[in-house]
């Protein structure tokens, strides 16, 4: 009986670890989708002669065309430079990544 209890405790611990790894990998996939969205937004900005190629304009364009899915994506440009922060949120938990304009 004790052996079964130990095996169950190990199995539950391993399952929890695998679930956490799965959530982390899924969040990183959502960040990659966000990076792709920003690359597409940059292309749209570059093709529009009325817009400057700035992080702010790319962010505006990306926020207009957010992909739908398991995660909610948000984009925010830094106050200086060409870096944009990507926030992927699911079930109240957020993961962030960055994208730098070429």
Image (cartoon, rainbow, N blue to C red):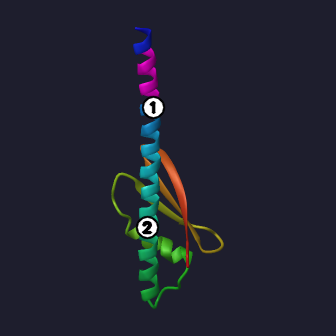
Residue furthest toward the front?
3
Packing grade of label 1 (10 A; few <14, some 14-19, many >=20) is few
Q: Main secondary structure of the magenta part?
A: helix
Q: Position of residue 10 (x, y in %)?
A: 46, 24
Q: Residue 41: give its label.
A: none
| First along the sequence among labels 2 and 1 | 1
Distance between the alpha carbons at the discs numbered 2 and 1: 38 Å
Q: Is residue 86 magenta?
A: no
Tell me the residue at 54%/65% (across/down): 76
Residue furthest toward the left?
68
Tell me the residue at 42%/69% (across/down): 37
The magenta-colored residue range is 5-13
Location of mark 2 (residue) = 63
Image quadrant occupied by the N terminus = top left
Location of mark 1 (residue) = 14
Residue furthest toward the bottom?
49
């Amino acid at each position: 009986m004790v052996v079964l209890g130990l095996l169950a405790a190990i199995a539950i611990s391993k399952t929890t670890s695998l679930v956490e790894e799965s959530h982390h990998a899924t969040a990183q996939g959502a960040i990659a989708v966000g990076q792709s969205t920003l690359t597409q937004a940059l292309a749209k900005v570059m093709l529009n002669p009325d817009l400057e190629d700035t992080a702010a304009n790319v962010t505006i364009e990306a926020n207009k065309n957010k992909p739908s899915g398991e995660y909610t994506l948000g984009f925010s440009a830094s106050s200086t430079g060409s870096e944009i922060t990507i926030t992927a949120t699911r079930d109240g938990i957020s993961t962030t990544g960055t994208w730098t304009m070429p």
